[in-house]
Image (cartoon, rainbow, N blue to C red):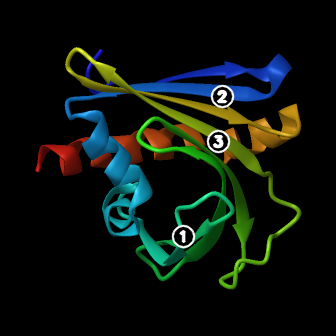
Amino acid sequence: MKNETIISKDLANKKLHITRHFAAPVAKVWKAWTESELLDKWWAPRPWKAETKSMDFTEGGFWLYCMAGPNGERSWCRVDFTKIDAGKSFSAVASFCDEDGNLISDFPKMYWLNVFEPAETGTKLEVDLSFDSEADLEKIVAMGFEAGFTMGLGNLDELLEA
């Protein structure tokens, strides 16, 4: 089970459920998800890189970053933090945007619930992603979310082992 990303789709409820185990304590995994300097090291699937423009990890705060591609491509995203239970879970809404954080309305929003639990061998991470419609879920999947997020979590494994 270690190092395996499990993604299940629930189209009827417009959700993706992701489970991943990490061989690191919750505090270390939490830090990697909540500090921009660490997020920039693992968030994007290679050869892409995450580049944070600003981050305020507080309820009502947001993370503004871009995915920078190997040929100069830049795709911007804004993650608005809606609820934080320090060291245990946080909820956020992720939206595509321009480099100033202005939302692009024709791209789907993703509603994240990330739960970090102690496990015998480290940390169990469970992520629930909800969408406004089945079409929005399908659009994100068609954009390569499953492979990209799995690769990013693999990058996180490497960072945690360092």
- The picture places residue 78, in percent across and down from the top left corner, at 66, 66
Position of residue 83 relative to residue 78, above or below, is above
Amino acid at circle 1: Asp
The Cα atoms of the two marked residues, 2 and 3, are separated by 10 Å
Residue shown at 43% from the left, 56% from the top: 34
Numbered disc 3: secondary structure: strand
Give the label on residue 112, or none: 3
**Label 3: few (<14), some or many (≥20) within 10 Å?**
many
Amino acid at circle 2: Leu
Residue shown at 73% from the left, 27% from the top: 15
Which numbered disc, 2 or 3, marks the residue that appears first in the sequence? Answer: 2
Numbered disc 1: secondary structure: loop
Amino acid at circle 3: Trp
Quadrant holding the N terminus: top left
According to the image, label 2 marks what residue? Answer: 16
Task: Answer with left or right where residue 142 lies relative to residue 155.
Answer: right
According to the image, label 1 marks what residue? Answer: 56
Task: Pick the residue in front: 27 or 159.
Answer: 27
